[in-house]
Image (cartoon, rainbow, N blue to C red):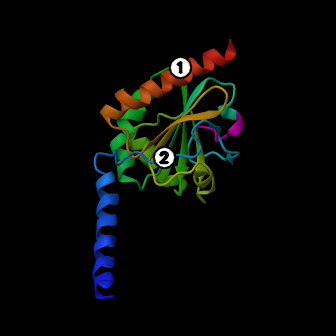
């Protein structure tokens, strides 16, 4: 009986070691999304009152080409880090860039975009985080690529870096464009 009592902690420690060892080498920014290859959720976000852009809804992400949806907040430090990548993305004429402003007073959202630049074609206010929950957002920033059919084809969790911009986001946009073109033929 004593041997069993000694073996139980050893088995538990070995099992924990196996779990941790299996996670070595995984990308810490990769968070799987149940919404990949699924239609965008139903939502309708009013505009942020202090910004000139309109809000947007599910219907805006269907039939209008490839869209990129970025979830951000003025209170989010990593959102500042990724903002130059969004400004670069805004120079592309082959996508529409949408922002979901999460849990922000309108004056804070305006101050943030006035300071760093406003890359968005439309910005919806998600003060109660309901739309973010429906999108499966774990934390801001998160960025989604949506094809012409309104299907989420890619999700990036965390700030977009120079590397993830070039190696993940741009290829995901190109893939969504290609898939949309194939679906239309």
Q: Please report the residue visible at 45 percent of the width from the left and 48 percent of the height from the top.
A: 31
Residue 116 within the magenta-colored segment of the rendering: no
SS for dot 1? loop
Disc 1 to disc 2, C-alpha distance: 26 Å
Magenta segment: 53-59
User: Can you identify the residue that label 1 sits on?
Assistant: 94
User: Can you identify the residue that label 2 sits on?
Assistant: 32
Q: Can you give x and y, in whole percent of width and height, for residue 21 in the image?
A: 29, 55
Which quadrant of the view contains residue 63?
top right
Mark 2 and mark 1 in contact (Cβ < 8 Å)?
no
Q: Can you give x and y, in whole percent of width and height, for residue 147 in the image?
A: 60, 28
Q: Please report the residue visible at 34 percent of the width from the left and 44 percent of the height from the top.
A: 27
Q: Can you give x and y, in whole percent of width and height, for residue 55 in the image?
A: 64, 42
Q: Please report the residue visible at 61 percent of the width from the left and 60 percent of the height from the top.
A: 128
Please state if 16 lies on the left or on the right of 182 as rendered.
left
Which residue is most to the bottom?
2
| N-terminal label among 1 and 2 | 2
- Work out which quarter of the rendered image holds the C terminus and state it: top right
**Badge nearest the viewer, 1 or 2:** 2
């Amino acid at each position: 009986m004593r041997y069993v009592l000694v073996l139980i902690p050893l088995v538990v420690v070995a099992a924990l070691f196996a779990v941790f060892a299996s996670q070595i080498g995984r990308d810490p920014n990769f968070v799987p999304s149940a919404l990949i290859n699924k239609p965008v959720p139903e939502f309708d976000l009013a505009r942020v009152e202090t910004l000139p852009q309109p809000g947007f809804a599910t219907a805006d992400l269907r039939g209008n080409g490839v869209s990129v949806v970025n979830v951000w907040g003025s209170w989010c430090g990593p959102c500042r880090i990724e903002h130059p990548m969004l400004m670069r993305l805004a120079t592309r004429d082959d996508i529409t860039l949408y922002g979901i402003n999460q849990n922000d007073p309108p004056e804070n959202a305006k101050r943030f975009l006035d300071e760093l630049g406003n890359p968005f074609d439309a910005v919806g206010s998600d003060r109660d985080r309901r739309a973010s929950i429906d999108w499966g957002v774990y934390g801001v920033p998160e960025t989604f690529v949506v094809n012409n059919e309104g299907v989420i084809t890619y999700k990036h969790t965390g700030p977009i870096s120079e590397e993830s911009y070039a190696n993940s986001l741009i290829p995901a946009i190109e893939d969504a464009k290609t898939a949309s073109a194939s679906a239309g033929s």
